[in-house]
Amino acid sequence: MFPTLADISYYVTLISYLIAMGILGLGTYRAFKIRRALAHPIYRSRALWLALVAVLYIIVLFTDLMPYPNQTNLVTATLITLAVTLPYLVFAFMMFSSVDRTILVAIDMDLFRRNTFQWPRLRSPVYASVLGSFFLILVANPFLYLQNPPLWATTADLAFYPLFLIPLVISAIALALSARRSMESTMKRFVGLFSVSVAFFIADSILFNYVYYFYYTPALQLVDNLVIIAATYFLYRAITSLTPLGRVEPLVAT
């Protein structure tokens, strides 16, 4: 019996996720190894943050592959939310925080101290929007697993992504501008690669949470799989771009 299109789509997604998790696993290993070899605290911090982002990304991809029921009682739905949605929110917050801290570092290292988007002032309302969106989805998400979810829960689910993605898009643009303005070549390369990874992550969020919601095809699933692989690849490249900075050479006995 020949596999159906749905079966092929599932296996392609599974392989794509395994590739992405493999890239992230290698990136995590490289990040911790690079962190031990760096002398400059700023770049040690960047390596650590991206290692944590990579680990959380692996957890998110793994939970996406786990089957869970669409219809259940509220107690079970709350447990599913904590097991599936909470890891994504922790990862998303860590991704956003990494972008935020990288923008601040780039501004601080800029010779002319150019304040991209007045970021030190803008970051407080942006954080408020991100945390508010997280609270909204944690409250609404358990009700979405019920047989007849209330309209307010569906509306809150759709509203979550603009409240989170708009601040992330703004921060991604600020990150890209910071890369262009950086005078230090390695920081410029690192920020540029990280901004590309964030852009692909945003594209995946839009495809997975909005496009699929209204219109799903296996072709779109394939595109999303490629976007996920691209996001993980550029995150890996951002991690490895830190290698040339502040390397600590082993002492040689004389």
Image (cartoon, rainbow, N blue to C red):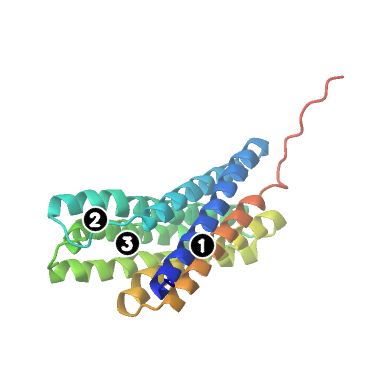
In this figure, which residue is indicated by the disc labeled 3? 129
Q: Which amino acid does label 3 sit on?
A: Ser
Q: Earlier in the sequence, mark 2 or mark 1?
A: 1
- Callout 2 secondary element: helix
| Marks 2 and 3 in Cβ contact (< 8 Å) | no
Quadrant position of the C terminus in the picture: top right
Q: Determine crowd level at label 3: few under 14, some 14-19, many 20+ residues with C-alpha closer than 10 A.
A: some
Find residue 214 and report its horizontal and vertical position in percent.
Answer: 31, 79
Q: Which mark is residue 16?
A: 1
- Callout 3 secondary element: helix
Q: Earlier in the sequence, mark 3 or mark 1?
A: 1
| Marks 2 and 1 in Cβ contact (< 8 Å) | no
In this figure, which residue is indicated by the disc labeled 2? 138
Left or right relative to 74: residue 54: right
Q: In percent of the image, x 60 and y 59: which residue is there?
A: 191
Find residue 154 and report its horizontal and vertical position in percent.
Answer: 20, 69
Residue 246 vs 81, above or below: the answer is above
Q: Which residue extends farthest right?
A: 254
Cα distance in 3D space between marks 3 and 1 = 32 Å
